[in-house]
Image (cartoon, rainbow, N blue to C red):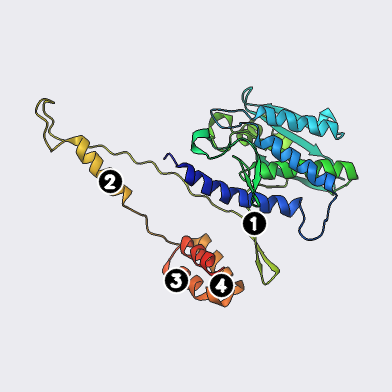
Amino acid sequence: MKESPRMHNTKARQVCAFAAILFASAILCNAQATRPEAEKQLAREIYKEMIEVQSGFTTGATTPIAEKAAARLKAAGFPDSDIFVGGAKATKHNLVVRYHGTGARKPILLLAHIDVVEAKREDWNMDPFQLIEKDGYFYGRGTGDDKAQAAIWLANLIQYKKEGFKPDRDLIVALTADEEGGGPFNGVDWLLANHRDLIDSEFALNEGGWGENVGGKHVANYLQVAEKYVVNFRFEVRNKGGHSSLPVHDNAIYHLAGALQRLSDFAFPLKTNEVTAAYFKRMAAIDSSQFKNLVVAIVLFGLGVPAYFFWRKRAT
């Protein structure tokens, strides 16, 4: 579906708000500075550099980002032997870098994709491939998904190197191609098939996780155990046929159009499953009292996840 510029602007604000929060949580500060200005400036420079490379599935390339990241790592003192740049094709390169720890524990993989959803300039009221900060938000394609995380991983690794930080395990950062487009150029799939040794680790941290604070107390870390999946349907319509010089209302094209209209008016019923029911039961124990009845109703009557978050948004 082609989205209007206004829709894109709204989505940009939502995504960039997330980016601003994520960026601030790791790099920026609130009332009192926690890190030197130079460190924050480096992270922002990396972030800007990544945003302003067009890395869409069909109209761009991830290779320039991987190469720029590798150059920054080498300038920070990482040896060539710890940096890998390569991929399924010349425009779809990935970056993998290893920061050595003591080796007491198995490595951890820090993963972020550097490709983005396509963005047409005419659909945006500003350049989607220029990092713009306005009214407390970052604007630009990929500001949240997922170049903010990629910039944070890279900036942190450079800072660890500068400080001589020695973790008890190796830290592996992988910046990968074509998460959005998938297909034969997906960076994670390609690395698993061709360079498993580079990313082999005990566990990985990827985009999509967040937590919950209640009354200023950190009470939950969320993790993803499932994802929505695509289901394709085939519509086939037949009628008696006839000659185009004598069109009739009993026309297969009209029947198909009617079916598509009815489909557009249909909404699948909201329901919980084993995973979401467990989530809401646990949230009922830690959420504030104004949400508990709703949470119980969701679990018992299957009101669905959107109802819960709509309620929370209105209440807060």
Label 2: element kind: helix
Distance from Cα at disc 4 to Cα at disc 2: 39 Å
Residue farthest right in this picture = 164
Residue farthest left in this picture = 246
Q: Which residue is mark 3?
A: 300
Which amino acid does the dot numbered 1 rest on? Trp
Q: Tell me residue 137's x, y (percent).
A: 64, 50
Q: Residue 127 is drawn in which quadrant?
A: top right
Which amino acid does the dot numbered 3 rest on? Leu
Residue 261 got which mark? 2
Decide which of 224, 314 is in the foreground and name it: 314
Q: Nearer the viewer, mark 3 or mark 2?
A: 2
Left or right of residue 93: residue 235 = left
Q: Residue 254 is drawn in which quadrant?
A: top left
Label 4: element kind: helix
Q: Which residue is mark 1?
A: 210
Label 3: element kind: helix
**39 over 296 or under it: above or below:** above
Q: Nearer the viewer, mark 1 or mark 2?
A: 2
Q: Tell me residue 94's x, y (percent).
A: 68, 31
Q: Mark 4 Cα within 10 Å, few/some/many (few <14, many 20+)?
A: some
Q: Nearer the viewer, mark 1 or mark 4?
A: 1
